[in-house]
Structure formats: structure tokens, C-alpha cells
Image: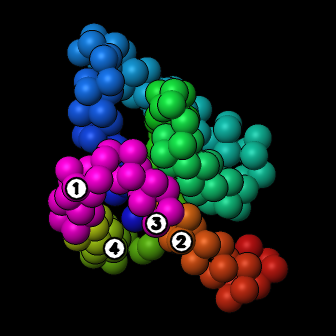
């Protein structure tokens, strides 16, 4: 679900920055920087994972980092550093999730799980993308970014509530 927010930001931040005087070159450099960070963190995902407490540390830390970055984009006049953090986080999270699924799901069920994951992502994008556009057009993109951050926080709270209350102390 959080990835649907970050992908939406990729598209809507282009309009936001263009309307705020950024050149295409500047916008391209920001996205190139985020992609470069994502690629570098993907390469070193296992080392970074060990540094932050292994798999459990990663799946507890990265969603929080993404949520904080969503708030940074929503509230800060200087949004690009937070978008770079999103690029860093996505690179780690994509590798970790892929590794996690490959390890936990038997190969005969893996395609079904990956198809379901893709379908859920598509559902959220189909729902979220026009909503953000409507909010941006009706109110402002800043308002849309606030809604993204607030919704991401609610999703994060439900995720962490599950992790701590239902899954127990042994995360």
C-alpha cells in the first residue's frame, strides 16, 4: 500500500515542482538521484539489513522511514530530500520483500502470492491515483500530499498494531 503512495508521488511531484519553478533538468536530477540511491541500497541490501537488526529490524524500520518521508514531503517546502529518502527505502524494501517471499512461500505457491501482490498494488493505484488528482485539482497538491501522509500513517499504525499486539512481542 505504501508503494502506491510513493509511485503516485513520482508522478504528482513532477507537476508540483514544475509549477514551483523547477526545470525539467532539475526534476530529472532529483528522480535520477532517488533511482541511484534505490539501486545502491538494493546492491547492499543484505549488509544494510544486518546493520539495522536483520530482517525484523528492516521490516520495522523501513515503513516508519517511508511514513516520515511522506510527512516530510507533505509539510516541508523542500521536498526533494524526502523523496531521496523514499528512493533509499524502496531499494531496500523491494529486495527484502522479494527475499522474504522467496524464503517463506513454497515455489508452487509463489506465483499466486506474487500475482495477488501485484493485483492489490494495481487496485490501490486505480483507486488512489485519481483521488490524488482530484484533491490536487480541487484543493492543492499540498493538500493531496497531506492526505497521502495521513493515510500512510493510518496504514502504518494498523501495521505496527498488528506487529505488536497480534503477532506478540516476538516480532
86 up-or-down from 143: above or below: above
Q: In the rendered structure, which disc, 1 or 3, sits on the residue that comes first in sequence?
A: 1
Q: In the rendered structure, which disc, 1 or 4, sits on the residue that comes first in sequence?
A: 4
Q: Are marks 2 and 4 in contact (CB under 8 Å)?
A: no
Residue 134 colored in magenta in the image: yes
Residue 30 colored in magenta in the image: no
Q: Are marks 2 and 3 in contact (CB under 8 Å)?
A: yes
Q: In the rendered structure, which disc, 1 or 2, sits on the residue that comes first in sequence?
A: 1
Which callout, 1 or 3, points to the residue nearer the camera? Answer: 1
Identify the residue shown where x is 48% and y is 45%.
74
Q: Could you tell me what secondary structure mostly forms the magenta stretch? A: helix
Specify start and end residues of the magenta stretch as a single range. Answer: 125-151
Residue 154 is tagged as 2
Name the residue tied to disc 3: 151
Disc 1 and disc 4: Cα gap in Å? 37 Å
Q: In the rendered structure, which disc, 2 or 4, sits on the residue that comes first in sequence?
A: 4
Amino acid at each position: 500500500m505504501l508503494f502506491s503512495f510513493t509511485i503516485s508521488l513520482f508522478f504528482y511531484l513532477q507537476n508540483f515542482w514544475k509549477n514551483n519553478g523547477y526545470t525539467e533538468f532539475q526534476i530529472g536530477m532529483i528522480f535520477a538521484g532517488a533511482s541511484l540511491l534505490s539501486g545502491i541500497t538494493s546492491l547492499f541490501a543484505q549488509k544494510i539489513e544486518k546493520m539495522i537488526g536483520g530482517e525484523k529490524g528492516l521490516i520495522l524500520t523501513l515503513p516508519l522511514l517511508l511514513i516520515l518521508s511522506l510527512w516530510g514531503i507533505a509539510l516541508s517546502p523542500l521536498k526533494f530530500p524526502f523523496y531521496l529518502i523514499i528512493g533509499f527505502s524502496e531499494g531496500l524494501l523491494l529486495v527484502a520483500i522479494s527475499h522474504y517471499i522467496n524464503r517463506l512461500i513454497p515455489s508452487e505457491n509463489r506465483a499466486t502470492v506474487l500475482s495477488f501482490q501485484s493485483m492489490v498494488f494495481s487496485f490501490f493505484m486505480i483507486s488512489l491515483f485519481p483521488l490524488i488528482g482530484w484533491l490536487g485539482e480541487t484543493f492543492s497538491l499540498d493538500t493531496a500530499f497531506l492526505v497521502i501522509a495521513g493515510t500512510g500513517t493510518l496504514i502504518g499504525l494498523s501495521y505496527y498494531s498488528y506487529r505488536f499486539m497480534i503477532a506478540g512481542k516476538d516480532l
